[in-house]
Image (spheres, rainbow, N blue to C red):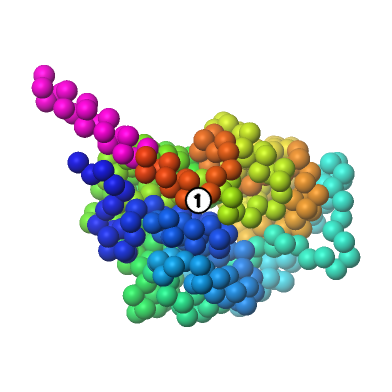
């Protein structure tokens, strides 16, 4: 029986372990690839092409020639001519006032004059995502993943012309089939337990449904996976790899903006997250805070749709992070946060994953051996 985290997909990509690590931090992405996995840099925060180029240059210099990829957030349908100013103009004044009132209630200071928001995410606007791709395709990336499902057809074609595999996240078997029909190469079956944008189906149910729906396309299991034992379970359900994101947030290579946020993650249990629209306008699992409670309160105005909500709360999130306002301080993270109890290097995480995987396989072998003897 398999004793290493290797599959046909990992062999095709030339990586030792079928562990795909999504992260917004270049140092983490490079460390994942160096450790034998496949690092995937999240691009949604890069609004300036030069910033993405700088970090991809850094990864190239620190990845030791190992493969890596990029994750973008763009709609499947092509939308042209919509600017950030157009989107800003759609935000109701009542929602702006709600943000001001919530910050004032908790005494959150203003940013200094001329200080720009560091959290202003516009990467889910198509024109921004396309500038990211213009940069990325100048680098030897091996995978392009899209968090909003299948990217536009011309993007898939462009990736394939450059021998780049395309992955798309799916929250249901129906979504997985749509991605397969669109011509993508890998489905990431992201369960309800996962951090960030998720659907409503748990990983144990979703993974085998997605595998069956798109066979023979490879499926990566995401959500609720933070140990080698859980990775082994995903393989047993038919996945050709695991997609891990939350687990890297408390690694020593990560660059979270707040020591207090790290403390909150290390102290959180698996029941301390909530699926909320507070950050982006789409349901995203994150730490439950008084900020998420305010937006989820039926007495409040409710979150706006993407991308309006993200633009609305950008400055507020930057202020909360800068001044470490503990009751409001949070981040997208999955239920696996309950296992994230100490700061460790990426390599230490991989060592733990591989030991746990071998332990799970040995246990299955023992159980199967006893059953065969009976």
> Residue 83, position in %: x, y?
66, 74
Pointer 1: residues within 10 angstroms few (<14), some, or many (20+)? many
245 vs 11: above or below: above
User: Which residue is more in the foreground, 148 or 305?
Assistant: 148
> Looking at the image, which residue is at 62% across and 63% down?
45
The quarter of the picture where residue 68 lies is bottom left
Q: Is residue 363 magenta?
A: yes
12 vs 323: above or below: below
> Residue 129, position in %: x, y?
55, 71
Q: Is residue 338 left or right of residue 232?
A: right
> Looking at the image, which residue is at 21% across and 32% down?
365
| Figure quadrant of the C terminus | top left
Residues in magenta?
A: 356-374
> Looking at the image, which residue is at 74% across and 66% down?
89
Q: Is residue 73 visible?
A: no
Q: Which residue matches tag 1?
A: 346
Q: Is residue 67 visible?
A: yes
Q: Is residue 53 left or right of residue 83?
A: left
> Residue 74, position in %: x, y?
52, 66
Q: Is residue 372 magenta?
A: yes
**Extreme left residue here?**
373
Predominant secondary structure in magenta?
Answer: helix
236 vs 144: above or below: above
User: Which residue is more in the foreground, 174 or 246?
Assistant: 246
| Figure quadrant of the N terminus | top left
Q: Is residue 326 left or right of residue 49?
A: right
Q: Is residue 55 left or right of residue 90?
A: left
> Residue 208, position in %: x, y?
30, 43
> Looking at the image, which residue is at 78% across and 53% down?
322
């Amino acid at each position: 029986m398999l004793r290493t985290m290797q599959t046909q997909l990992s062999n095709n990509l030339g990586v030792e372990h079928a562990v795909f690590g999504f992260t917004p931090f270049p140092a983490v992405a490079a460390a994942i690839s160096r450790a034998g996995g496949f690092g995937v840099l999240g691009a949604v925060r890069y609004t300036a092409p030069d910033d993405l180029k700088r970090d991809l240059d850094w990864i190239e210099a620190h990845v030791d020639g190992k493969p890596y990829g990029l994750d973008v957030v763009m709609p499947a349908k092509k939308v042209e001519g919509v600017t950030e100013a157009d989107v800003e103009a759609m935000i109701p004044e009542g929602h702006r006032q709600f943000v001001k009132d919530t910050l004032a209630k908790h005494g959150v200071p203003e940013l200094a004059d001329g200080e720009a928001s560091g959290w202003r995410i516009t990467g889910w606007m198509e024109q921004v995502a396309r500038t990211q791709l213009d940069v990325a395709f100048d680098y030897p990336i091996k995978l392009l993943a899209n968090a909003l499902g299948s990217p536009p057809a011309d993007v898939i074609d462009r990736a394939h012309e450059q021998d780049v595999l395309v992955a798309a996240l799916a929250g249901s078997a129906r979504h997985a089939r749509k991605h397969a029909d669109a011509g993508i190469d890998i489905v990431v079956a992201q369960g309800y337990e996962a951090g960030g944008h998720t659907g409503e189906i748990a990983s144990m149910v979703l993974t085998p449904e997605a595998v069956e729906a798109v066979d023979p396309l490879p499926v990566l299991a995401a959500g609720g996976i933070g140990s080698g034992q859980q990775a082994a379970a995903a393989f047993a359900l038919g996945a050709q790899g695991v997609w891990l994101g939350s687990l890297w947030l408390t690694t020593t290579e990560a660059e979270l903006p707040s020591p207090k946020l790290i403390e909150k993650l290390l102290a959180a249990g698996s029941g301390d997250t909530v699926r909320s629209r507070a950050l982006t306008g789409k349901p995203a699992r994150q730490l439950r805070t008084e900020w998420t409670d305010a937006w989820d309160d039926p007495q409040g105005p409710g979150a706006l749709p993407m991308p309006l909500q993200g633009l609305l709360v950008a400055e507020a999130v930057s202020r909360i992070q800068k001044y470490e306002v503990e009751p409001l301080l949070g981040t997208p993270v999955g239920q696996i946060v309950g296992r994230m109890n100490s700061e460790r290097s990426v390599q230490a995480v991989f060592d733990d994953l591989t030991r746990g995987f071998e332990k799970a396989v040995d246990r299955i072998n023992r159980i199967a051996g006893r059953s065969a003897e009976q």
